[in-house]
Image (spheres, grey):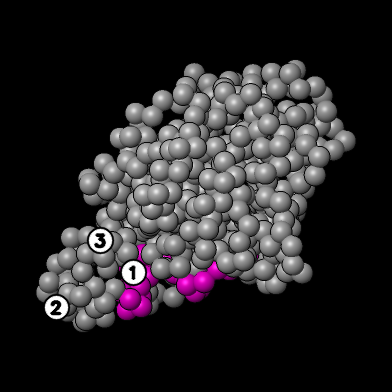
Amino acid sequence: MSENQTSRRDFLRASVLTSALFGAEGALTGKEGRGVAGNGGEARNVILMVSDGMNHGALSLARQYQGLVMQEESNWMRLYRERPVVRCLAETFSANSCVTDSAAAASAWGGGRRVNNGVLNMLPEGGEVVPMHAKLQKAGKKTGLVTTATITHATPAGFAANVDSRADEGVIAQQYLDRRVDVLLGGGQKFFGEALRAAYEGAGYEVVTSRRALRRAKPEAMKPIFGVFAEGHLPFSIDRNHVEVIAEQVPTLAEMTEAALGRLKEAAGGFFLLVEGARIDHAGHANDAAASIHDQLAFDEAIGAVLAFVEAHPDTLLIVTTDHGCGGIQMNGVSADANQGFGPGLYNASHASFDRIRGFERSMEWMKQNGIDALSGEKLGVALRRFTGLELTVEEVKMAQGIKAGWQEIVKGRTGIGWTSGHHTGELVEFCAYGPGSGSFPAFVRNFEVHDLILKAFRMAM
Ligand SMILES: [Zn+2]
């Protein structure tokens, strides 16, 4: 029996079990559901996974890279293939724009109300929105926030904080403590000075600042945990994958997710966990295709960790989505001979694009942090070959100087991967729900509706 057959069989067993445990509501032809077995009933836990700034192009590219280069199947697509997932298109507007920023998007999920861009859970007409963490705490549930950005960044903050400006990360750092968020794992050491870290410890948190310390932390301690592993955002996965000192210091998103689940799984009243792959968005802003792919792969690895948990805990509702697109990344068909027009070889050099992207071992961010952008001439050519595998002509090396637009043009020419801008985009995005409560999600879902649907899955009043 193949591995796929085994996991499908195990899954079917889990789904029958879920129906048995949670009754027939929403199952098969349930009135509130969309006719998928095992999607009714009450969720004890909810895990919301967000690949920040991921348009369909970013999802597609990472999946193709995974299949063509790594010969692996994407966990996200395996979820679609093997399980009765409720799949939706999601609208991502904020209160004042059809293109949202992450703060308004996270507020819509975390508070249930649309707010203006840049704002966290403060209404345009004035007044605060009660964030999800406060509601869950009252209901006896725990909250975990895991991200590859600063832990005080817009997306995690949308579930626990109230501030007029998302830039007030120091204020958010204090609010997390005052409001006792149970699990906090990500970057952002610079927002937690010595006094504040001591205050976290004084309040009973286990405080960790390295990958090794996170590994040593014992989940059975059931203490709240606070872990920050970099000054600012965690480094891009492409850099982590190729630079040993980064890998030693910084845990992967999957590792942080597993640590969070270990900490939360025994919570008597259940839990809510946000898992954010934050840097897909940053790769989009920077138009860095290789960084986008590697961070999306790290997100997919975290999906794998969550699927293992969900299999063992079928009373968990899993949602996987994004808050908006960013940069409009897209693979464009590439022909071997650009002059052949619509000949028989049309687009058939596209697979080779992935071989070129495979040669990239550093993000543009790392190259700038390490002075590659200050190089020119032969030195620059050698460095770019070393870190990206691309052989450049003298003319191209001149174009690449500064690792800016000219460099991006070269990468686009060699790989076919293009961008529409360095900004967020307004398109409909991918959204899926799996497990108890998923039957309530409509095929077209607006971001602010997700909040109430999560509370509904928890059987909590809105
Ligand atoms: Zn975002």
Q: Is residue 64 left or right of residue 117?
A: left
Which mark is drawn over residue 411? 1
Q: Marks 1/2: CA distance? A: 18 Å
Whether the residue carrying mark 1 lies under 8 Å from ligand 1 is answered with no
Which mark is drawn over residue 377? 2
Frontmost residue, 208 versus 383: 208
Place of residue 198 in the rendered image (x, y in percent of width and height, measured from the top left): 40, 43
Amino acid on which the number 3 mark rests in the picture = Thr
Mark 3, residue position: 388
Classify mark 2: helix, strand or loop: helix
Q: Marks 2/3: CA distance? A: 16 Å
Amino acid on which the number 2 mark rests in the picture = Gly
Quadrant in the picture for residue 99: bottom right
Please tell me whether residue 231 is drawn above or below residue 123 in the rendered image: above
Residue at image location 37% in from the left, 70% down from the top:
412
Q: Residues within 10 Å of mark 3 (few under 14, many from 20)?
A: some
Disc with the residue nearer the chain's start (1 vs 2): 2
Quadrant in the picture for residue 163: bottom right
Place of residue 336 in the rendered image (x, y in percent of width and height, measured from the top left): 35, 67
Residue 126 at least partly seen = yes
Amino acid on which the number 1 mark rests in the picture = Val
